[in-house]
Amino acid sequence: MKKIVSLFFALIILCFNKAFAINESQQILKDMNIQNRISEIGLKILNSNEIDKRMAFFYSKKDKLIKGEPSLTKRQIVVYGDYIQHAADENEVAALLSREICQCAESYTGPWRGLVSSAQIKAAPKKYEIFFDKRAVDLMVNAGYNPLGLITFINKAFPQKRFDLISSHNLTSKRLANIYEYIYYRYPYYLQNNEYINNESYQNFLLTSIENRKKLEEKVNKNLRKPIKYE
């Protein structure tokens, strides 16, 4: 009887280990596919924009808040699991990578091998956040990606805070409004031939940006040059 019980438990352990090994192998393959996808799109953006700054791309399932900001300090682009899960297509992956590439590339400019520029970015994060958002649009277009993917990605991945007075980041609504305005003036083709018009995230952006888009419409109608104070 004891031998039968022992054999029974041995079979259970064997089955469990086999199932665990299969799941682990599947997860490894999944991570490898994500890593290859990130590297391929990232290198395409670098090459298409002739960015001659050395940077590498990594996928991590860890939380960005714990990991820190490696694009300035280590000059590597780390794509975290809690962000990449919001990227539904290649345009949105390109949006995420383009934004980080801009920041990483900026860390190469200026004296002391970019230490000064990195310090400036950390000292004025809101200013550079808008700058990098707009620059990311340029990188995407040059690489053949639809820049509206930046709007849909940010709309899904970044929540709306109550205030931005004491925050190191702008309100998400301000970022989206500035990106939309930049595309409106610089790349109107993508709005006139809008592939994202039926996308739920883009529709949500339109719904939640009515007031900011009214401000842009007024600026256009009156031919104003003064920057808009988006909310």
Image (cartoon, grey):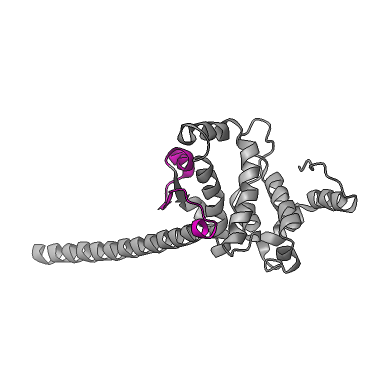
Left or right: where does residue 158 sit relative to residue 97? right
Within the image, what quadrant is residue 225 found in?
A: top right
Left or right: where does residue 95 sit relative to residue 216? left
Name the residue at 60% across, 36% down.
125
Is 70 magenta? The answer is yes
The front one of 82 and 153 is 153
Q: Is residue 106 visible?
A: yes
Q: Position of residue 39 (x, y in %)?
A: 43, 58
Q: Is residue 169 visible?
A: no
Name the residue at 54% across, 34% down.
117
Part of the protein shown in magenta: 45-74
Left or right: where does residue 169 sit relative to residue 204? left
Rendered-image quadrant of the C terminus: top right
Residue 184, compared with residue 111, is above or below; it is below
Q: Position of residue 168 (x, y in %)?
A: 61, 34
Is 201 magenta? The answer is no
Rendered-image quadrant of the N terminus: bottom left
Q: Position of residue 224 (x, y in %)?
A: 86, 46
The front one of 13 and 93 is 93
User: In the image as oriented, which residue stretches furthest toward the right?
Assistant: 222
The front one of 143 and 11 is 143
Picture mark count: 0
Within the image, what quadrant is residue 191 found in?
A: bottom right
Name the residue at 52% across, 39% down.
109
Q: Position of residue 76 (x, y in %)?
A: 43, 46
